[in-house]
Image: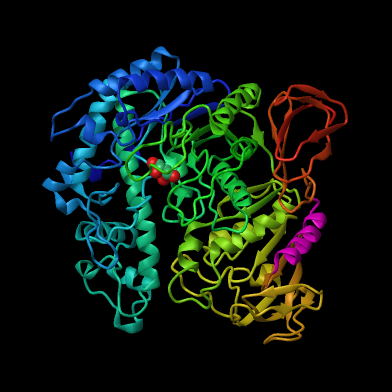
Amino acid sequence: MNSRAATLNETATAAPFVHEGIAYGCDYNPEQWGPETWTDDVRLMREAGVDLVAINIFGWSHLEPRAGEYDFATLDTIIELLHANGIRVNLGTGTSSPPPWLTTLHPEMLPVTAEGTTRFPGGRQAWCPSSAVFREHALALVEKVAERYGHHPAVALWHVSNELGCHNALCYCDDTAAAFRLWLEARYGTIDALNAAWGTSFWSQRYGEWAEILTPRLTLSSRNPGQMLDFHRFSSAELLDYYRLEAAVLRRHSNVAVTTNFMVTAHIRNLDYWSWAGDMDIIANDHYLDHRLADPAIELAFAADLTRGLAQGEPWLLMEQATGAVNWQPHNLAKVPGEMTRNSLAHVARGADGICFFQWRASLQGSEKFHSALVPHAGTDTVLWREVVALGATLDRLVEVAGSRVVADAAIIFSWEAWWAGDGESRPSHAVRYLDQVHAAYTALHQLGVTVDIVSPDADFSAYRLVVAPCLYLISDEQARNLGSYVAAGGHALITFFSGIVDEDDRVRSGGYPGAFRELLGITVEEFSPLLPGHVLTLDSGAAASLWSERLRVDTAEVVANYLDGPLPGIPAITRNGHRSGTAWYVATALEPGALRNLMRTIAEEARVTAVGPESAGTIEVVRRVNATGSYLFIINHGHDDVELPASGHELVVGEPIGRVVRVPAGAVRVIREDPAS
Ligand code: GAL
């Protein structure tokens, strides 16, 4: 079979993932231990209430020790053992890391970096997404796994590969270049159309033949931005194509739901998950706290809300997180007691119907031996193990929450394409980073107690009272119209600086910035005026700002605040424009967090956005999940003081009736099944 031929049309009907209550699980890599440990493992899994276990994620070298020779004995035993203990299996296809014999036979499948250097085996995921030989061998393994376990009653979910693109999303080898050219031909049809899209008339970059086009390996100068953007699009599509190939094999042998684990987490940006989401039978995400960020818990909430956005509001699974420290950040902080539970329930509050971890038992060897696990090196007479067991019991008490949905009044537009293009090599300020600006907008709403959906620029905004577009540098005409029509019909929008600048080819919209939104915002920006790091501006509203300013003039908008100092004193920095029945606000600078929160409060009040929780520095998270019969109020207290909030109903974590006020101790979580009237 030509592996490249099987795309979209071969993926058959989706199958639902069915699980009673909130799933509790982990990655399990039993190959590291012998059978006595396996018996002990399942006993402990039962003690903790673990009911969904991901296995065979890195199984290839065990299942196929030599080319074409398969050995399923260990996997059979593990599956039967889990099944006999009532533990459901999230079955990996086993293809995420090729065995050494394969890379020895076919070194041409190894990925190549932007410098043109081959990345060698010895780590993991050492394969080029476009490699035909990799695809052939991987799909042969999937066929065997699917054939053998496709109807096994323990198999609850298929787990395709693992974190596709975690390390190998961008490969610059010759096979990739050939696949890139095919993708470009399909996108543009003619070389002239490609030249027009990439603006190759500049710097003598005009292509005469498809064969002249390469992957964007490192150059002496900055690289062509159109080529870079398309390379990102292609690379995301290439791995999605690979996912579809595996999924198609699985669906031929099984009716069980198929998914793979996304990486909606702060430092990964290479896959456009809006284009992937529709292929998943259930959305699953891996999330790790990133202690390099100012507030990792707020980023967790953002990632969970974005994951729910990818799931179109449906419940989703947290496929991986850590019970404590990871081992891949410069400083790997342990979680304090209670933090794992708070983080887990924050994911549930934001729509997760499953909480899983990497990994079950801490490795004694290998690269991840200092990564936390459910069973730590120190064993089960530990604070951590007791919390693991308690979390299982808590999730059991939340059984009725499963299937309910989060409803939000506000949305933030998020775009991988805008991220790729806006954070490109030649840009006005390298201090302006897309994700920072999205996080800033999210943090302001989070601290106001507002629940936010994270949505694609193509989403239907009509259900929202407020839509925020932070630094949305790239936007298509159609997407710009989508936001414009939402405001025209009575919606409220806040757009922040460096938005609406280019079209989908990264071509500047001429006539003044922000080209796509000039009319909507009633302003024209003549010139960007970025600031040096550390330079703080003051506005006449008293607000402080940094990073960016713009020579802006109002057309139809009213001025809300001007710069007092900096390069543009007296020039408007915040504007508000009535557009048909709605209102569009613009902020031309990076307001410091308190000022952004104040502005967001004003806009949210004007838009009549309901805050579900109280205003806090992010220490109190309140989110509501609703279903046909009622609603559940999650209150997560990350702070050091007990809090009291109005609520009435029945509390599920400790199991007590709540009259009018619920007390949430410092560091605790409460989930209230609300009385219908509340
Ligand atoms: C994920 C991966 C797991 C494990 C984990 C550690 O990226 O899927 O296999 O490596 O990170 O944090």
* Residue found 50% across the figure and 75% down from its top: 508
In the displayed image of the protein, which residue is found farthest to the right?
Answer: 660
* Residue found 81% across the figure and 51% down from its top: 608
Q: In the drawing, does residue 565 fall left or right of residue 49?
A: right
- The majority secondary structure of the magenta stretch comes to helix
Count how many numbered circles sit on residues in the image.
0
Between residue 12 and residue 179, name the one nearer to us.
179
Res 10 → quadrant: top left
Q: Which residues are magenta?
A: 592-608
Q: Is residue 595 magenta?
A: yes
Q: Is residue 672 magenta?
A: no
Q: Position of residue 153 (x, y in %)?
A: 38, 15
User: Does residue 96 lie above or below 21 as drawn?
Assistant: below
User: Does residue 286 lie above or below 648 as drawn?
Assistant: below
Q: Position of residue 120 (x, y in %)?
A: 22, 54
Q: In the drawing, does residue 205 fall left or right of residue 209?
A: right
Q: In the drawing, does residue 531 fall left or right of residue 642?
A: left
**Looking at the figure, which quarter contains the N terminus?**
top left
**Looking at the figure, which quarter contains the C terminus?**
top right
Would you say residue 579 is visible in this rendering? no
Between residue 49 and residue 448, name the one nearer to us.
49
Q: Position of residue 615 (x, y in %)?
A: 79, 51
Between residue 273 and residue 557, name the one nearer to us.
273
